[in-house]
Image (cartoon, grey):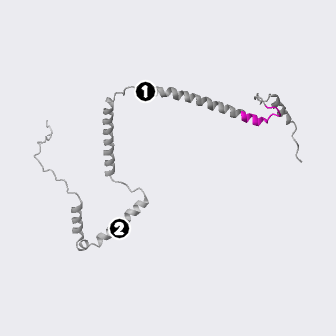
Amino acid sequence: MVKRKIGGGKRYKAAANGQAHALPQPEKEGPAPPLHVQKKLARKVNFLTKVSDTASKLALNKLSSGVSKKLKRKKPLPDLSSLGAVLEEEARRASERARDAVKRKQRGTAVKSAKERQYILKEESKRLQQVLHHKLYKEDPIAAITNHLRRTLPPPTPAKPPGPKAAQHVPTSKRS
């Protein structure tokens, strides 16, 4: 068996007398709505007043800021003479970064994963099989390799001819 709550009417009496949370009394006659409904209604009213206040402030700001925007557009442009120097400096930095990137790439790239290593191994083994089955390689392997290297590698830089050497001073030990 469930016990009934006793004293629930006190809230209704307090709400009817306007003592609960100082809420405004409705102008209707009859029993007052429950307290939670009154609180909910008060929160909605507060929210709506805040929204209307902010909306009116924004409308005033738009009107006043619209005039100032027009005035701002009529002002002369700032001096852009220093912009050229800044752009040149930035272009120089960009070219340096590009050169550094090229240098890094020329050093060689490392294989970064096992999958890449497997792929390279597969490609190189195919190439090796092609070389081994080539008729020129079968006849003379050394001559075929040297011929291939001559065709693919860039020509070596010419060695500087030995010019007349300047007289080098050879220190002699002093004998005393």
Nearest to the observer: residue 40 or residue 70: 70
Categorize mark 1 by other alpha carbons within 10 Å: few (<14), some (14-19), many (20+).
Answer: few
Of tags 1 and 2, the one toward the viewer is 1
Give the magenta part as a residue range: 28-41
The residue lying at 72 percent from left, 34 percent from top is: 41
The residue lying at 27 percent from left, 72 percent from top is: 134
Residue 127 placed where, x, y %?
Answer: 32, 67
Asked if 24 appears above or below 147 in the picture, the reply is above
**Is residue 49 found inside the magenta-colored segment of the image?**
no
- Identified by mark 1, the residue type is Lys
Q: Quadrant of residue 132?
A: bottom left
Instruction: Work out whether mark 1 precedes mark 2 in sequence or the reverse, and give the earlier one.
Output: 1
Instruction: Name the residue that disc number 1 marks.
Output: 72
Asked if 155 appears above or below 22 in the picture, the reply is below
In the rendered structure, find residue 125 and report the number of the disc placed on it. 2
In the rendered image, the residue lying farthest to the front is: 28
- Identified by mark 2, the residue type is Ser
In the rendered image, the residue lying farthest to the left is: 164
